[in-house]
Image (spheres, grey):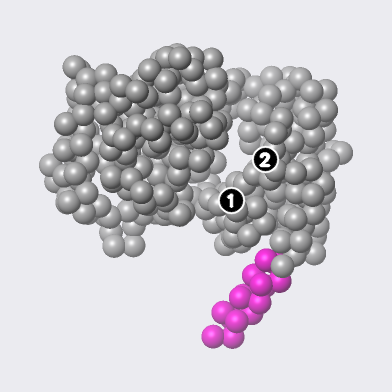
Amino acid sequence: MSQLQPKSEGAYLLSLEQLEQLVRMLDEATNILILPHTAPDGDALGSTLGLMQILRHRYPNKQIHVISPDPVERYLSWLPLVDELCQWQTQQDEALELIGQADLVLHLDHNRTSRLRYAELIAALEANTSPKILIDHHLYPDEEVALSLSFPRASSTCELVCALMHAIGFASHICRDAATLLLSGIITDTGRLMYNCFETETFDTVSRLLALGADYPFVIDQLSYHGTLSQLRLQGYVLHQKLVVMPELRAAYFTLDKSEMAAFDISKGDTEGLVNLPLSVEGIDSVCFLREDRDQIKLSFRSIGDFPVNELAMRGFGGGGHLNAAGAEHHGPLDEAKNIYLCELKKLTTEYNQRKVDQHAL
């Protein structure tokens, strides 16, 4: 096992002690359980399923499983090994049994157990006193775990998993399916390498995964050419009737309520990528998409340049993310969430413009 040594300004720098502890914990475990966050996206699924497959190759006699809090959305149903997920909402008895048997729990792509949302699931995990490992790239990680591998400057959790596997000598166990899963997570979490990928390590990782057999054409084909007519019509509706542009703030936003979602017969996953569309317009530097779900308002933020939408998500809603891509939740009416967003946007824009003036003066 060799120590990973990226450039000092890189996305991650792991100590030899951390790597040795990771291997020791994996070696000593018999039943390993891996969990993504609720409503898992490409990075959450790619990292958990990819790591599951790698560890199964490395430890063929161990039991290694992934529990997903929510079902997989249609737009990601093509991912390899998705059918091997244990889905909490439809397989609770099996999930509780796996939690009870687990002697090592890995939390991937979420910074704290509360991101799993469901009280009974969280309670079962908290009742399990086995060691916990956190592998994540979000801010403010839960430090009450046996081993925290949190690197917010990394593009994705999939990138971290790949780096870890190379660092601890497990690269030979990254099969074609695992490589494709890890690549899928990087591609989806960076908007196809358009944001959150400003470190050379990200592109080195992509090259490594391609060399290991990751099926890049398949991933791009599935993400680009397998939508539905309802999705296409929804895009037109949003851009023509829902988009609100605020030139003075160089920003735009749009909302979708439950009735509109039902009218177009779409699921939450069918809105993936909508928030990016207005950024193609000159003069729009940031976008917010507010979607009314069954029990909350989901907010997605995107930006270009150095406008920090993660600050916007955190200030107004206690959310977070990265400079150009962030998310948050609001438990209240849609109009209330919109008004909070607009208030915080105006304040942040004023501060951001002042920072620019100050920097220029220096």
Image location of residue 144, percent across then percent down? 36, 49
Residue drawn where x is 17% and y is 51% of the image: 17
Q: Is residue 267 magenta?
A: no
Left or right of residue 134, residue 296 in this image = right
Residue bounds of the magenta highlight: 348-362
Image coordinates of residue 313 in percent, x first then y, are 62, 54
**Whether residue 92 is situated above or below residue 357 in the rendered picture:** above
In depth, the one of 237 and 265 nearer the eye is 265
Indicate the secondary structure of the residue bearing disc 1.
loop
Extreme-left residue of the structure:
1
- Residue 298 lies left or right of residue 130; in this view the side is right
Can residue 356 be found in the magenta stretch?
Answer: yes
In percent of width and height, residue 125 lies at 40, 32
Q: How many neighbours does mark 2 have within 10 angstroms: few (below 14), some (14-19), or many (20 or more)?
A: some
Q: Which residue is mark 1?
A: 319
- Tag 2, which secondary structure? strand
Q: Are marks 1 and 2 in contact (CB under 8 Å)?
A: no
The residue that mark 2 highlights is 298
Above or below, 13 relative to 354:
above
Please name the predominant secondary structure of the magenta segment in the image. Answer: helix
Residue situated in front as seen by the camera: 362 or 91: 91
Say which quadrant the N terminus sits in. top left
Q: At label 1, which amino acid type do we have?
A: Gly
Please identify the quarter of the rendering in which residue 329 is found.
Answer: top right
What number is the disc on residue 13? none
Q: Amino acid at mark 2?
A: Lys
Q: Is residue 192 left or right of residue 244?
A: left
Residue at 83% across, 40% down: 242
